[in-house]
Image: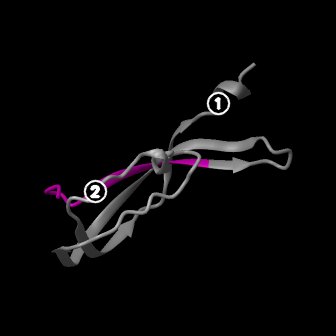
Amino acid sequence: MRADGQYATFAIKAIPDYTGGLRVCDLIRTQITDIDIKWAWQGPARLHLAEHVMAPLADLPVHQVISASHILTDLTLAPATPVHDYLDQAKRP
């Protein structure tokens, strides 16, 4: 855990328009703050990788789960801020 207790997370925000194209396609950043760990333990676990177009992790073979850490927390997720507009190049003449 970082000393200041703050973590940046990134995601792609994609919103289609009415024609099926993209209306918004931004890289966004949010900050996780005020982390209060309620409970933490190590124990058995199973791994389920779901199919997703942006992250094809479900295609990876999982042979064995070595260990697992479970953490129950209260935290604050700050509002998202745009970092990069992927459609900005397409908007320019």
Please provide percent x and percent y for residue 5: 21, 61
Q: Residue lying farthest top?
A: 93
- Provide the residue span drawn in magenta: 1-13
Residue 71 shown left or right of residue 26 in the figure? left
Number of labels in the image equals 2
Numbered tag placed on residue 88 in the rendering: 1
Q: Nearer the viewer, residue 2 or 41?
A: 41
Callout 2 crowding tier (Cα within 10 Å): few <14, some 14–19, many ≥20: few
Say which residue appears at 34% left-offset and 68% top-offset.
46
Is 64 in the magenta? no
- CB under 8 Å between discs 2 and 1: no
Residue that label 2 marks = 64
Numbered tag placed on residue 63 in the rendering: none
Q: Quadrant of residue 86?
A: top right
Please provide percent x and percent y for residue 88: 64, 30
Say which residue appears at 38% left-offset and 52% top-offset.
9
Q: Is residue 69 above or below residue 12?
A: below
Q: Residue lying farthest left?
A: 3
Residue type beneath disc 1: Asp
Please, which colouring scheme is shown?
one colour
Camera-near label (2 vs 1) is 2
Q: Is residue 83 above or below residue 5?
A: above
Q: Is residue 23 above or below residue 88?
A: below
Residue type beneath disc 2: Gln
Please provide percent x and percent y for residue 18: 84, 50
Q: Residue lying farthest front?
A: 63
Q: Quadrant of residue 36?
A: bottom left
Say which residue appears at 69% left-offset and 50% top-offset.
15
